[in-house]
């Protein structure tokens, strides 16, 4: 039986997808049978995970609405131990409304997570921004959760609120562990960025913040643009090394 690790955040653009994709690749590189599931209708995992050219684009939404069986929506990637379930077909407004309704009104998502962890060592879930019904369903089926926090000035105002909201959800689910806040896009020598790190380290209990921080690097953004996780494309890049180290920390916690 494996573990479901979800990446969630109230805020958008904080590095959720980058974190999900790189952790999944780092687990798979260690030889762990890994599945990454994208439940964000924006479907960004598709662009960052390293799929073969001309791959199908079906995914979770097509399984959710009954259009495709599970075996059709689990796709191979360039890494032998990494499989991916893309977001699938959620193109227009009608699709979006139906998507959210189906996630809220059915148990398809938590049941999928339960089935997936019986077949994999780790299931990584990339979620949409916000703590809406999709994220809540994800957390219902998760064992571990990571909350990326971008090192930018607004984080000082939003962090306590984000942490409280997530802690409320975590407390309602006894099998869910909040592994911690992950400081992302950290820029050394940038005072605004350093202030966030300083604030978080001083005000949030140490067991709720990872020691590892993810630096902002050009290689990370370039890798995403090139359709590959940075841990595969530029393994010696500082952000790639940080994600690899974070994966090791998590593996120790899974044991
Ligand atoms: N460590 C990093 N260094 C440089 N760029 C980064 C880093 N992490 C993320 N980015 C860039 O920041 C942008 C937002 O990252 P990402 O898409 O992972 O955030 P997100 O939280 O998933 O966003 P959304 O809420 O829209 O789903 C992307 O362009 C990504 O390439
Ligand atoms: Mg995303």
Image: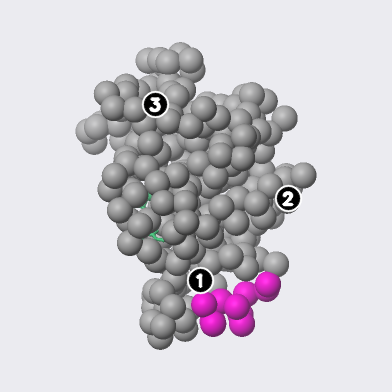
Residue beneath the point at 41% across and 83% down: 189
Q: Is residue 104 left or right of residue 252?
A: left
Residue range of the region highlighted in magenta in the rendering: 197-206
Identify the mark nearer the N-term, 1 or 2.
1
Q: Is residue 121 left or right of residue 75?
A: right
Residue beneath the point at 40% across and 46% down: 233
Report the front residue among 80 and 153.
Answer: 80
In the image, residue 152 lies at what x, y percent?
Answer: 39, 74
Q: Which residue is mark 3?
A: 59
Image quadrant containing the N terminus: top right
Using a 10 Å C-alpha cutoff, classify the residue at mark 2 as few (fewer than 14 neighbours), some (14 to 19) or many (20 or more): few
Compared with 5, 246 (above or below) is below
Please name the colour scheme applied to the rendered image. one colour
Image quadrant containing the C terminus: top right
Q: Which label number is shown at residue 169?
A: none
Give the foreground label among 1 and 3: 3
Using a 10 Å C-alpha cutoff, classify the residue at mark 1 as few (fewer than 14 neighbours), some (14 to 19) or many (20 or more): many
In the image, residue 15 lies at what x, y percent?
Answer: 42, 57
Q: Is residue 125 visible?
A: no
Identify the mark nearer the N-term, 2 or 3.
3
Q: How far separated are the C-alphas under marks 1 and 2?
A: 27 Å
Instruction: Indicate the secondary structure of the residue bearing disc 1.
Output: helix
Q: How far separated are the C-alphas under marks 1 and 3?
A: 32 Å
Q: Which residue is mark 1?
A: 159
In the image, residue 28 lies at what x, y percent?
Answer: 56, 37
In the image, residue 9 lies at what x, y percent?
Answer: 47, 56
Q: Which label number is shown at residue 252?
A: 2
């Amino acid at each position: 039986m494996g573990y479901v690790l979800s990446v969630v955040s109230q805020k958008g653009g904080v590095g959720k997808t980058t974190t999900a994709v790189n952790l999944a690749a780092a687990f798979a590189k260690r030889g762990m049978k890994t599945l990454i599931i994208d439940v964000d209708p924006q479907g960004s995992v598709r662009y960052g995970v390293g799929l073969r050219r001309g791959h199908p684009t079906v995914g979770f939404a097509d399984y959710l609405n009954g259009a495709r069986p599970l075996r059709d929506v689990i796709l191979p990637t360039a890494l032998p131990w990494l499989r991916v379930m893309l977001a699938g077909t959620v193109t227009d407004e009608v699709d979006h409304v139906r998507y959210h309704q189906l996630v809220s009104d059915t148990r398809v998502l938590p049941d999928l997570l339960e089935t997936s962890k019986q077949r994999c060592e780790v299931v990584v879930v990339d979620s949409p921004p916000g703590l809406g019904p999709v994220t809540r369903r994800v957390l219902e089926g998760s064992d571990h959760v990571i909350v990326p926090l971008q090192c930018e000035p607004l984080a000082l105002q939003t962090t306590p609120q984000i942490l409280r909201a997530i802690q409320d959800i975590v407390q309602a689910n006894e099998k869910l562990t909040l592994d911690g806040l992950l400081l992302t896009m950290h820029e050394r020598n940038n005072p605004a960025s350093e202030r966030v790190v300083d604030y978080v380290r001083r005000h949030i209990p140490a067991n709720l913040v990872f020691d590892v921080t993810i630096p902002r690097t050009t290689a990370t953004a370039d890798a995403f643009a090139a359709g590959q996780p940075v841990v595969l494309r530029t393994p010696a890049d500082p952000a790639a090394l940080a994600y690899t180290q974070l994966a090791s920390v998590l593996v120790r916690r899974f044991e």
